[in-house]
Image (cartoon, rainbow, N blue to C red):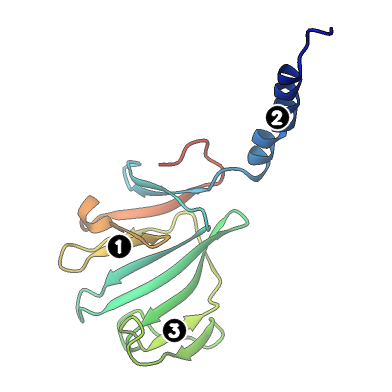
Amino acid sequence: MKRFGYAVKGRLVGLILALPLPFLALAYGPSPVLRVVTDGGEVILSVAIPERRWEVHWRHSVSGVWLYEAYRWCDGAIVLTDAFAPHLDLAGMGYTPGRGELRLLPEGYRGVRYHIAGIDEVIPVEHRFRLGSSLAPTVLVVAGRHYPLSELYPGGSVRFEVLAFSATAP
């Protein structure tokens, strides 16, 4: 046993101390993965969502203005948290009392004037999103990175799904 030198003992102690690290990573799990899935079941995009948040930016097909929606992954559900618009008289847009809080934004913020904060509406699993064309694009934004969904599947119908603790994330 005397031959068991300090270097070997040091390596063993280091190995024993390092063993819990992978288990801690598993306990917290890797980032969830957001997938964009077509009606036919094809996954057109998979992206890690380390902050469990993302946005969908889309251009209104009639008015041409940009609209922004913010989502988060919370307790196993996709939740619409916020919406941003330059004005509230667009078809399908607007503020409904009791559905979040309407805030007026300073001029020039993202080119929009209205922010509906705290919507906190759970999006049903079967909910479909219609992607725009190149003239009215839809863009997914995760952690500041832009993914042009309209280029991947122009005019298509998709749904978002989250794999809570995928072993691999692109």
Q: In the displayed structure, would residue 133 be above or below residue 2?
A: below
Please, what secondary structure does the residue beneath circle 2 have? loop
Q: Look at mark 1 in the image and give the residue it sits on.
A: 139
- Residue at figure coordinates x 43%, y 59% from the top left: 127
Q: Is residue 153 visible?
A: no
Furthest toward the right, the residue is 1
Residue 75 place in picture, x, y as percent: 63, 56
Q: Please name which of the two marks, 2 or 3, marks the residue nearer to the observer.
A: 2
Residue 111 place in picture, x, y as percent: 30, 84
Examine the image and state in which quarter residue 87 appears: bottom left
Q: Amino acid at mark 2?
A: Leu
Using the image, tell me which numbered label, if any, was put on residue 115.
3
- Residue at figure coordinates x 48%, y 65% from the top left: 71
Q: CA distance from mark 1 to mark 3?
A: 19 Å
Q: Amino acid at mark 3?
A: His
Q: In the displayed structure, would residue 153 be above or below residue 17?
A: below
Estimate how packed mark 3 is, as few (under 14), some (14 to 19) or many (20 or more) residues with alpha carbons within 10 Å.
Answer: many
- Residue at figure coordinates x 59%, y 53% from the top left: 76
Q: Look at mark 2 in the image and give the residue it sits on.
A: 19
**Label located before the other in sequence (2 or 3):** 2
**Label located before the other in sequence (1 or 2):** 2
**Label located before the other in sequence (1 or 3):** 3
Please, what secondary structure does the residue beneath circle 3 have? strand
Q: Amino acid at mark 1?
A: Val
